[in-house]
Image (cartoon, helix red, strand yellow):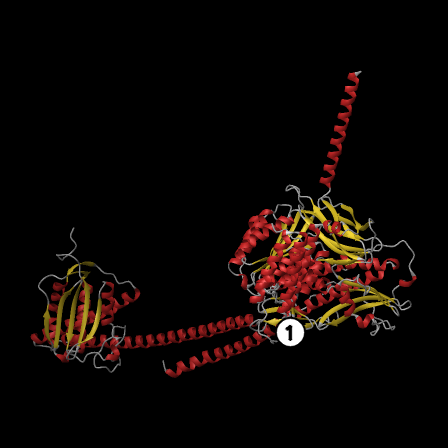
Amino acid sequence: MRETVRFRAFMRVALILITTTVLVSTAVAAARDMPVTCRIETDRDVLPTGGPQKVVLKVTLDAAPVEATKRTSVNLSLVLDRSGSMAGVKLEKAIEAAVQALRRLGPKDIFSVVIFDHEVETIVPAQSASNTESIERRIRGIRSRGSTGLFAGVSQSAAEVRKNLSGKFVHRIILLSDGIANVGPSSPDDLGRLGRALLKEDITVTTVGVGMDYNEDLMTRLAQNSDGNSYFVESGANIPRIFSSELGDVLSVAAKKVRIIIECPKGVRPVRIIGREGRIKAEHVELSMHQLYGGQKKFALVEVEVPEGTEGQVTEIASARVSYENPFTGDTGSLTSPAKATFSGDTERVKKSVNIAVERDYQLNLNALSQERAVALSDEGKTREAIRELQGATLRLREVGKRINDAALLEKAAEMERQSSQIEREGMTAKDRKVLQTDGFQLRNQQLNR
Amino acid sequence: MKIRSIVVYWLFILVPTLAVAVAMVRLLTLERDRIVQQASSVALDRAKSIADALQVTVETVEANLGDALREIPPDRVLETLQGWQENNPLVRNVFIWRSGTGLVYPQRDRSGTVEEKQFVLRYHALFSGRQQWPGADGSSSETRSSASQDLPGRTAVPGLAPQQDSRQSFVQEMQRLQTGAQQLANLARPKIEKSGQRAVAAYASPDSGGWIPWFAENRLYILGWVGSRSTGWVYGLELEVVTLLSQLVAHFPATAPEGLAYALVDGQGQVVHQTGNPPQEKGRKPALGVSLSPQLPHWQVVVHTTGNRPGTESARAFLILGCMLVAIFVLAVGLGGSMLTRQAHRNMKDALQKTSFVSNVSHEFKTPLTTIRMYAELLSEGRIKDPEKGRHYLNVIAEESRRLTRMVNNVLDFSRLEQGRKTYRIEDLDLAECVRHILEVHRLRVQEAGMALETEIPDAAVCVRADRDAMDQVVLNLVDNAVKYAAAGAELRLILRQHGDHAEMRVSDRGPGIPASHRSRVFEKFHRVDDSLTAQQQGCGLGLNIARRIMGDLGGDVLYEPRDGGGSTFIVRVPIRASETCGPDRA
């Protein structure tokens, strides 16, 4: 009898173990098959009772790391500025970087190189990246000359990418320039629209501005509208590192055509999107991200207005619906995640419920917008107002940083203070402008700087 | 040969040659101008072809998008348009408008993007009803829907360049443009999801439509629309000009012919794209321009010349080459003419010299022959009784015979030398001994001519390697020459010396000498200082020529120099043989 009891106990434990193993395995497998996870948070879990109030929503997309052996083929086109100003170290390093990028690609990848001055020349038409010797020889033969026809260079590069415009590739253009576009359409608006149009064709443009003379507005707008990255390198020496970082992103795309729809229940009104472009409709917000890279977290911040609540009321603020395309299988996936909050009249409880990570990202994004406004004011010759804008942003960062006791915000506030003091002393230099513009863009884009 | 004859001959050669040359240069100049003109015409035709291709491409895009607008199912208009706006790179904005109501989409509330708000502002005049939709009043503004059949590649490519390579590359460039046009045409056919539902009456059957080039803030925008006159609904899209340009630019000819640059210029005169190296100076007008209206109003494809006009380089090269050929022609004719004239002149001179030579030789022969015949007749008739006198006559006959023999020998030697048949019996020779022997033989004759013979001949042997008879002939000719022309000087000096690697024999007299103008020609055959038949001294002008040619054959030379104090000196140089003893070759 005792043996029967022991046997039953043993069988029960075994059954539990087997069930647990099966469940864990299934969960792991599910997690592995799911390249993206979604999380929606609010800046506070507990909202004060009373009149309508502003709540910040943060939708975070977390892309799982991509195995090195399992990656999407890349259709990469490099657009190199070979105008006279690139002569010397800048062009040498650009060539070196291009060769290194080529060597990192495999036979299944497509590679092309377009160079431009006042004219455009396709020195390596789109072809398999296996023919490295001959491609390398052609890249090393690039010599500097002429002026800067950036629009035509990107257009020609896009034409090379279009030769293999199928879904199985990650299409990427990397533009490197050190000058101000002076041939063809050359306003940030024109290039931004070109970037937007290319994004519709699934082509992303990453821009690398070298030195102090390039037009950072144009370069960041082009990258921003095509959902690419933007870099500022002060000297040519950093170009290979930037290329390597960018190629790291390109080679680890985990999800494509990501679309986020934040739906708000009745009474909750979307107010504005922070740091990203999107569309606000009556009760929902539409956002899109072109690509997510393995191991990367990308988020979107939205301000919503929540109506009055009563003590203890639990209310749904919003739910996020995310759809994306798996670059390996071509299948589409979707996720949903809700965000809830409780109303309370206890101020201390409300204060304690602050989500520091959401508040930090919100403040940093607001700060990036302030930086952009400061740049715009400075461009209009309103240096005083620009400094005031930066100082205001600094005060806000410091105040919030102290309130939530966040070292990152305080550190950023100190950096902003240094920056605004320097601008007050010396005016806004070309370097300041580039740093503010590019940093702001990188922050809003959650660009990975490996 | 008279100068006048030469001038006449030259005129006959030169005048027609120069006339032909002038005519050729004139033709070449005309041809050069024609090449330049043709190159300009080719450049214009190419620009027209590019402009045509661009126009047809834009027209095709507009036609395809217009067709797509018409094909939208009436119940899916907003959804379809929004889909295009989101996914089609050629669509910048979309709209729905209704007469009386105004703009239905995009809404002017907070849901619109910044771009949409700017779009609404841009076309405010149209959307507010201040400006009528073109053609909405009943006039037709239908877009041609068959434009897609006129893709650039299907249009004829006029004005091809004369060079095959250039033409091929141009055709390739046009194919490139055609590829771009095809890609754009495909983009301009957005997907339309068919509806299974019945048509909503409000949007039913668009019966008008078209494209409006719209200028705002100094920029060109293009709005396409379709509408129904009966219901007052109008919907459409704004073309993304940047996409259009980007694709056109990428397929614009990548190269321009040498000396040319093509540029696509917008309505503000700004260069949108260029091929080649256009001049950098501001305000420089293009050589040619072709308008892209009406699809892209005020836009142009322009042709710039870089440096020179099109074709100038090839035309210049052609002219230079042509002129060089003309110069070679004139030079060849001139050279040939002068050679012929010179040859004729020489032949004529030779003929005259030979005539003179024959006369002189006949005369030379006649004198001794007359003497010989006269004395021989006297002796044969037995009228000379005095034996002494008879011997004298016989001696005279013998002497004249020897003279005759020498003359014949000279003529024969000359003939052999001329024909290259003269043979020598080369041996080691003591020149001193040889000269002493010759002088011994001819001493009497020299003295009889009234000349004192002075010699300076070394006792030691002067060894040379020469032909004894030839050396005899040379010395004899020089001595004869002195006796003949310098007897009045009463002096004949012969000095033999050894100078380094050669022996030098100087034969000097105190005769009249040779005038400076004749010195360079005194060794030419038949040349005589006075070659008239009435000359005081007879001769055939061969002695010195033979002497020099013989010495030349023996490795030496004969030179002339005027003698100090008057007279002539002839210098004979003979290479010395490096040997201590002279005489016939010894084993």
Rendered position, B465 above or below A384:
above
- Between B90 and B52, the residue placed more toward the observer is B90
Quadrant in the picture for the N terminus of chain B: bottom left
Residue B200 percent across, percent down from the top left: 91, 60
Q: Is residue B275 left or right of residue B297?
A: left
Q: Using the image, name the chain to which the residue with label 1 belongs.
A: B
Q: Is residue A37 left or right of residue B546?
A: right
Residue B119 percent across, percent down from the top left: 77, 67
Quarter of the figure with residue B399: bottom left
- Between B1 and B532, the residue placed more toward the observer is B1
Residue at the outermost top position: A1
Q: Is residue A244 left or right of residue B191?
A: left
Number of numbered discs overlaid on the protein picture? 1
- Regarding residue A305, the answer to whether it shows in the image is yes
Q: Tell me which residue sits at (77%, 66%) in the image.
A: B117
* Secondary-structure class at tag 1: strand
Q: Is residue A281 left or right of residue A392?
A: right
Quarter of the figure with residue B558: bottom left
Residue B168 percent across, percent down from the top left: 63, 61
Residue B317 percent across, percent down from the top left: 52, 70
The residue singled out by tag 1 in the image is B288
- Regarding residue B273, the answer to whether it shows in the image is no
Q: For the residue marked with disc 1, what is the amino acid?
A: Leu
- Between B357 and A171, the residue placed more toward the observer is A171
Q: Residues within 10 Å of mark 1 (few under 14, many from 20)?
A: some
- Between B491 and A146, the residue placed more toward the observer is A146
